[in-house]
Amino acid sequence: MGCKCGSIESANCHCGRIVGINGNMITVEFYGTVRQNELAYIMLEDVRLKAEVIRIRGRYADVQILEEPRWLKVGGHVDFSGELLAAELGPGLLTQIFDGLQNPLPELARECGFFLKRGVYMDAIPRDKEWEFTPVAKKGDMLRAGDSIGTVPEGIFSHRIMVPFSLRGRYCVEWVAGHGSYRVDETIAEIKDSKGAIVKVTMIQKWPVKVPLKCYSERLMPTETLMTKIRILDTFFPAAKGGTFCVPGPFGAGKTVLQQLISRNADVDIVVVAACGERAGEVVETLREFPQITDPRTGKSLMERTVIICNTSSMPVAAREASVYTGVTLAEYYRQMGLHVLLLADSTSRWAQALREVSGRLEEIPGDEAYPAYLESVIAAFYERAAIVRLHDGSVGSVTIGGTVSPAGGNFDEPVTQATLKVVGAFHGLSKERSDARRYPSIHPLESWSKYNGIVQAEYLLLALKILRDGNDIAQMMKVVGEEGTSIDDFITYLKSEYLDAAYMQQNAFHVVDVASSGERQKYTFGKMVKILGAKMSFAGKDAARAFFHTLTQKTRDWNYTAMESDEFQAIETELDKMLGGESAQDIQ
């Protein structure tokens, strides 16, 4: 049986017919040549539904539909595009809100109303807008993939127009457009390869989302701390530019607020948020609040240097995987301009659930908790796309990936969390108990860890962590023997750990000063903390010790709420020094 194009079982045919349907997974008999991850279109009357080839077996291809699969029938027609699932790259991506297939959601809403229609796809980058192009290459220059031909202004950044990433070898510039305004689909340069073939270059190009972008000269070791201005992260469990971290935690532990704080204050140029399968309420909160958040760098809206990929739990399951890869591809694109990019994937658990559903429909042998046996390798391949790199022109760019994980019941032993912990460089575990006690950020200091270097001296950090561990052990003991069964020295250690937690590790996200603590301030205040933690103290009794630390905690919190350059900051510091210089506290041992 042939297809509608008439090329019966011809190698030139790019068609097929549906022979099996299982939810959003269909089996297609094809007649020509089909590639893994190739983009296909399922024809349903006058609607074309996007789909992706995920497995090929002889003359049959298993294809997952990235849309709602209702009303499909066996015998239906399928067109194979010959292209891989790809993202559009070019100026105009910033400030945009896309779905998992890179359709601009605001434009879709204007086109379709409140309820999005199937089979409606729009250009990710507007074709009618003109950009002011300034050439940097000239005739006769030898360029390669990723080298700059010119620039256009995009917000506060100089957006590089680059040689298409798909080209191999060196190309000679034959012609470059002069300074002026051009649309993204207009030719702005012509380059010639070694065989004399001319390639026309526009401002827009496509790149397969599941293929890492590697147009750089060297991959570097992530060593520079990614400053988030959140004390418990930068001081105790830092991430690195070009590194990876994960934030697992149960519902209500504060993942969304922590994600917004990192987005606002992190020392990066571009923020990409990939909401893959989160509840619609949380995504709506992100969409509403991000435009209202003031960017500390520019004083304008944070959305001006943000891209949001939105794929809620009510959207097609298969599109969750596409949203994650689309987000990291956009991040790699801006890294290619020498910028530092932060990708926040929320939540990778929903993405893994989509993988589990697809694996089940493929009838693959299940692994732990019915997740696919290759879950760890897929998660590892995603996080490996984080990197800090040196480009061909000597500039340095980075992609830092932070993924939130939503384990059922806060169980960190489940497969997604464990697979993530094997590949990330920092683990910021959120605690339901700390969240219930209103200790925010609710990152558990005894369960979290980081492989990266922080901003404080290692010996100071070890002392603080020892105090926290000893204080926790004493607190557990006090639950059994009571306060009266605890020695005064152990009780003071417990009070020191509570003081460190309350006065340094907790941070007020709604206070104009305490919401962001600079690296300089963290080093200074932590040095003061170390003196307090290392001081030998003696008190007349436990009530006196408790009263002293209660006053000290409140005074230090007031200190956190004052600007570092203010007279009030100096005044409170003087009061703290007087408290520590009294009879109750002596010098450090």
Image (tube, rainbow, N blue to C red):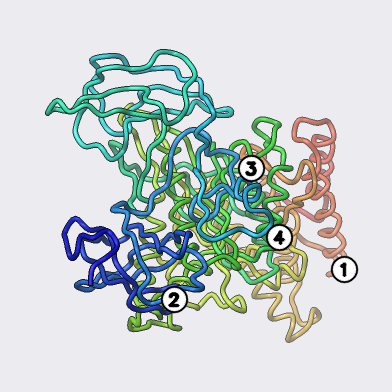
Q: Which residue is mark 3?
A: 265
Instruction: Locate residue 67 relative to residue 515 in the image: left or right.
Output: left
Q: Which mark is residue 295?
A: none
Instruction: Locate residue 446 relative to residue 559 in the image: left or right.
Output: left
Whether pointer 3 and pointer 4 mark residues with C-beta atoms closer than 8 Å, the reply is: no
Whether pointer 2 and pointer 4 mark residues with C-beta atoms closer than 8 Å, the reply is: no
Label 3 crowd bin: few (<14), some (14–19), many (20+), radius 10 Å: some
Q: Which mark is residue 543?
A: 1
Identify the amino acid type marked 2: Arg
Q: Which residue is mark 2?
A: 356
Pick whichever, 512 or 108, lies toward us.
108
SS under mark 4: helix
**Residue at the location (67% across, 70% down)?**
251
Identify the amino acid type marked 1: Asp
Instruction: Look at discs 2 and 4 and give the one toward the viewer.
Output: 2
Distance Cα–Cα, label 3 vs label 4? 22 Å
Pick whichever, 158 or 436, lies toward us.
158
Distance Cα–Cα, label 3 vs label 2? 35 Å
Q: Give the percent coordinates (x, y) of residue 583.
A: 82, 53
Q: Which residue is mark 4?
A: 501
Residue 155 falls in which quadrant of the image?
Answer: top right
Instruction: Look at discs 3 and 4 and give the one toward the viewer.
Output: 3
Identify the amino acid type marked 4: Asp
SS under mark 3: helix
Task: Say whether disc 3 or disc 2 marks the residue closer to the N-terminus.
Answer: 3
Distance Cα–Cα, label 1 vs label 2? 56 Å
Q: Vertical placement of 536 versus 391: above or below?
A: below
Instruction: Locate residue 139 relative to residue 316 in the image: left or right.
Output: left
Distance Cα–Cα, label 1 vs label 3? 40 Å
Distance Cα–Cα, label 4 vs label 1? 20 Å
